[in-house]
Amino acid sequence: MHTPSKASGATEIPVIDIAPFIARDPVRSRRVVQEVKDACESIGFLVLRGHQVPPALVEEVFSQLRAFFALPDEEKLRVEKPKGTDFRGYSPQGVKTIGRDRDATLKPSLHESFAIGPLDIGDGPYFHGEAAGISFRPNLWPERPPALKPALTAYYREMERLAREILSIFADALDVPHSYFLERVARHNSILRVMHYPALHREPQAGEERAAAHTDTTAITILRIDDAPGGLQVQRPGGGWIDVVKVPDTYIVNIGDIMMRWTNDRFVSTMHRVANPPPEVAARAARMSIPYFCMPNYDAVIECVPSCAHEGAKYPPITSGSMLSNRYVKVYSVDPATEAPAESAPSRTQELQ
Ligand SMILES: O=C(O)CCC(=O)C(=O)O
Ligand SMILES: [Fe+2]
């Protein structure tokens, strides 16, 4: 029997080739779907090859981003992320604390980041109404390096394509109509956030982490990493941490809280973190990663899919937009009294009972 190969050093995370699914090969697609399903129901993380994202584009994106992060702070701050719950633009170290919603004693995460959101901002009320809130504002593009915008734009398009393929595999794995998730991401507000973890020239203090343990508030996350030390670790179902070892030309995909809720906990949104590098290499351990946080439409109602409902839905329906803004208020320390997230205002986007 065929079994998927395992990522070296991370024995429990399977490496799955999705090329047969993308090619619509009916027989071999079934095997892909089964392998993906098994991984989603156990570890909640998978490594995908055969994704068809051009390697030259990935290289170009990494190289433009390295040039951006190497610019002086004052230049990067020209595209600084606005205060509050908008996510677009550059965030210096110090403003964001991943994991703060679980552990209030954490200090700001040891990384800077640059984020973009949807490229297609339509003209209709869906995109500009009050309820759309932070979802559909224009991206903030730096002037330098000039090739960053075309590279990241092309890359965002690739992530949209790959997300649709993965969600189609999930639909098959969950026995729901093929269009189930596709309809719910047709006007998605997915976030591409480049993370730059600078080299460390001092010992981190207690509570200072590259990215502390957390789950993602996404449908799925599609992550590209470089191979610098001080990297991603995934929590095992039985406890303990697995190092995710880079497999060349692959994507790491993990289930987020929204998919877990859609599936009534059948697919697992697994805790993960980015460890600080070992002290002996910390001074030359700069690391970059590019997570694409695949979000449903901001007003998609997230409720248990029919095939997972037989034991009764564990959670009430909630919109994707309110799940996201609830998390942002905590991670970016937004004061809800002075800056209420836009999604919390209109009643139709609040938790639906
Ligand atoms: O940098 C990484 O490898 C992962 C980052 C991450 O988990 C996140 O930003 O949610
Ligand atoms: Fe994450």
Image: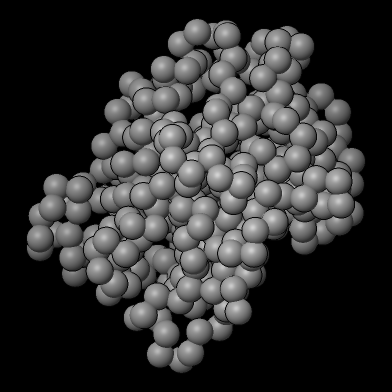
- Residue 67 percent coordinates (x, y): 57, 12
Examine the rendered structure and indicate whether residue 242 appears above or below residue 58. Answer: below
Q: Locate the N terminus and report the quarter of the image it occupies.
A: bottom left
| Foreground of the two, 127 or 186 | 127
- Residue 320 percent coordinates (x, y): 54, 59
200 horizontally vs 51: left or right: right
The residue at 33%/21% (across/down) is: 56
The residue at 73%/18% (across/down) is: 77
The residue at 70%/43% (across/down) is: 85
The chosen color scheme is one colour
- Residue 42 percent coordinates (x, y): 46, 71
Q: Locate the C terminus and report the quarter of the image it occupies.
A: bottom right
> Do we see residue 10 in this rendering?
no
The residue at 35%/60% (across/down) is: 181
Examine the rendered structure and indicate whether residue 227 appears above or below residue 335. Answer: above
- Residue 352 percent coordinates (x, y): 59, 73
> Do we see residue 170 in this rendering?
yes
148 horizontally vs 163: left or right: right
333 horizontally vs 63: left or right: right
| Foreground of the two, 27 or 158 | 158
136 horizontally vs 109: left or right: left
Residue extending furthest toward the bottom = 311
Question: Could you tell me how many numbered marks the image carries?
Answer: 0
- Answer with the quarter of the image where residue 279 lies: top right
Examine the rendered structure and indicate whether residue 314 appears above or below residue 237. Answer: below
